């Protein structure tokens, strides 16, 4: 027995070796399974960015980790501005220029939900049914209903009250340091809860307004290469996403149950129609996610730019002061009180300067990638390039291509709202040059609420305080932080900033 053990010892491999072997095996399987499709002579798919296993794998890595570099290189290397790449088992076409944008945004066959379901899966994978689009069309119908005038008019007083509470909390002392990104995050969550139909107690819940945005960011941040390349593997990212989705769904379900009699607006309509709790929570998650992903960031960036720009602060204040004068019921009223009397129509039509500033913030900070799938079995021509998006293929587009193009927007790194003023209208000469609210078949359905939410946050703060941009320690900064145009989605600045808020005379 002793001799046997000596002749055939059980190999003892260090864990690091075992892990290295497993990783190599997995990489090999992924490479073989996802080899780039071969091109036939008359294949009109845009040319691949990379061929062969190794370059292809490297490009796939860059698609996930250096998205803008990958895209810009693909566009630059192609005579038409379009290119293709196999990402896992999917054929993905990168589109650019007027012809690419036209095919991407305007063709009926280019389906949005199916594109996002694969490349940006923010839903619980167990609920994904690509063929039915995860009930997305019904949800869009509910979101459209949320934007109706009577609904916005209903929730506006609550939104103004939440903003007044937040501002008053910082107004006790002569000056206080505020993180605009945090304030906007909480307020927008409360506003959207109210717009969906929650009563004030539930919508204003301080714990949910803190937790909700954090969970939504966790869901957004947990999608990555694993969910596309090995969707069957329960990666840590997958587990984080599912846990965050379930946690938030649990809180929202509880809030709906607690306020069963108190709900209003779309929530009430859905409950009266007898929709299941799952369907109601799905509507809430989709609406909160769509609202939270960009709106608070844009409101906060707008405050940051205004704090460093006297000219635009004066423009925004002039139109705000005009409204305050018009709706002041008595001389003693504070700006926050007067804002409660400003009707929806004024919020929506009488702040054109604020709207120009928001438009410019979105141009500079909405760095998102957007996806489509050609859901037909027919090829879609890409203008007169001779190329097509084949039936069943996926396509992506990075909004930067339009928004940072110096031929359209001279000096694109400079925040300059006047570029959209009627005299200059830099975006008007080029087709689909401004995509801040999307375009064509999938334009933003929440623009009305988003603009109202941004206006209420900005007006409440700007009407009450003089603002000084500072670093975290309260030291004044003499310029606004730079936009990170290469991030995968809109972001706060890399170095945290604060606003010193001094009560305005
Ligand atoms: C400043 C804030 C916002 C910005 C910059 C923004 C921007 C956009 C853009 C660029 C798209 C098109 C995406 C694409 O083509 O792939 C889009 C679509 C969409 N947005 Fe917004 N959005 C904002 C706020 C909101 C809000 C508050 C909601 C709802 C509560 C919302 C709901 C939607 C929906 C449902 C779609 C998809 C439409 C469809 O499926 O056809 N958005 N948004």
Image (tube, rainbow, N blue to C red):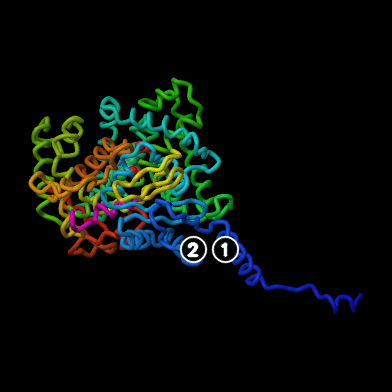
Is disc 2 surrounded by few (<14), some (14 to 19) or many (20+) residues within 10 Å?
A: many
Element type at mark 1: helix
Query: Are the residues at dot 1 and dot 2 in contact (C-beta closer than 8 Å)?
Result: yes
Image quadrant where residue 112 sits:
top left
Pick the front one: 454 or 157: 454
Q: Is residue 190 visible?
A: no
Q: Is residue 256 above or below residue 84?
A: above
Q: Quadrant of the N terminus?
A: bottom right
Q: What's drawn in magenta, residue-wise? A: 397-408
Element type at mark 2: helix
Q: Is residue 424 above or below residue 53?
A: above
Pick the front one: 128 or 14: 128
The residue beneath circle 1 is 27
Q: Is residue 137 visible?
A: yes
Answer with the quadrant where ligand 1 appears in the image: top left
Q: Is residue 299 above or below residue 22?
A: above
Measure the alpha-carbon separation of dots 1 and 2.
9 Å
| Residue lying farthest to the front in this orientation | 41
Of labels 1 and 2, earlier in sequence is: 1
Residue 137 percent across, percent down from the top left: 41, 32
Q: Residue at x 42, y 29 (%)?
A: 138
Q: Decide if residue 3 is on the left or right side of residue 477.
A: right
User: Residue 57 — which label?
Assistant: 2
Residue 312 percent across, percent down from the top left: 12, 51
Q: Residue at x 28, y 54 (%)?
A: 400
């Amino acid at each position: 027995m002793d001799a046997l053990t000596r002749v055939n010892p059980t190999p003892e491999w260090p864990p690091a070796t075992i892990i290295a072997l497993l990783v190599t095996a997995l990489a090999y399987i992924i490479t073989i399974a996802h080899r780039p499709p071969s091109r036939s002579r008359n294949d009109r798919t845009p040319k691949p960015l990379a061929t062969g296993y190794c370059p292809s794998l490297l490009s796939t890595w860059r698609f996930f980790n250096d998205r803008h570099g990958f895209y810009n290189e693909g566009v630059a290397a192609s005579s038409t501005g379009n290119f293709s790449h196999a990402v896992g088992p999917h054929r993905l076409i990168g589109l650019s220029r007027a012809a690419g944008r036209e095919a991407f945004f305007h063709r009926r066959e280019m389906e949005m939900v199916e594109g996002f379901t694969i490349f940006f899966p923010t839903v619980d994978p167990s609920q994904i049914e690509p063929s039915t689009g995860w009930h997305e069309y019904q949800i869009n119908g509910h979101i459209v209903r949320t934007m109706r005038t009577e609904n916005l008019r209903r929730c506006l007083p609550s939104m103004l009250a939440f903003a007044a509470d937040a501002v008053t909390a910082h107004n006790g002392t002569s000056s206080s340091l505020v993180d605009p990104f945090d304030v906007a995050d909480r307020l927008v969550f409360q506003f959207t809860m109210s717009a969906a139909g929650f009563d004030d107690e539930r919508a204003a819940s301080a714990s949910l307004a803190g937790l909700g945005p954090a969970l939504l960011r966790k869901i957004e941040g947990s999608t990555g290469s694993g969910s596309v390349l090995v969707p069957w593997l329960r990666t840590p990212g997958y587990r984080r996403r599912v846990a965050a989705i379930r946690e938030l769904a649990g809180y929202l379900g509880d809030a709906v149950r607690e306020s069963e009699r108190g709900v209003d607006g779309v929530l009430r309509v859905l409950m009266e129609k007898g929709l299941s709790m799952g369907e109601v929570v799905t509507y809430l998650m989709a609406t909160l996610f769509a609202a939270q992903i960009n709106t608070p960031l844009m409101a906060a960036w707008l405050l940051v730019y205004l704090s460093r720009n006297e000219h635009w602060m004066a423009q925004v204040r002039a139109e705000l002061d005009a409204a305050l004068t018009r709706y002041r019921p008595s001389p003693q009223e504070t700006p926050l009180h007067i804002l409660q009397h400003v009707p929806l129509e004024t919020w929506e039509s009488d702040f054109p300067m604020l709207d120009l500033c928001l438009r410019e913030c979105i141009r500079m900070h909405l760095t998102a990638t957007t996806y489509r799938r050609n859901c037909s079995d027919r090829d879609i021509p890409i203008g007169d390039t001779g190329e097509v998006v084949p039936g069943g293929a996926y396509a992506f587009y990075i909004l930067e291509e339009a928004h940072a193009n110096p031929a359209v927007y001279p000096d694109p790194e400079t925040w300059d709202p006047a570029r959209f003023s009627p005299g200059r209208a830099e975006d008007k000469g080029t087709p689909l040059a401004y995509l801040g609210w999307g375009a064509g078949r999938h334009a933003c359905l929440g623009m009305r609420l988003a603009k109202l939410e941004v206006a209420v946050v900005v007006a409440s703060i700007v009407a009450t305080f003089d603002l000084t941009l500072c670093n975290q320690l309260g030291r004044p900064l003499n310029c606004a932080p730079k936009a990170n145009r290469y991030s995968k989605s809109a972001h706060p600045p890399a170095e945290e900033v604060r606003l010193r808020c001094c009560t305005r005379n």
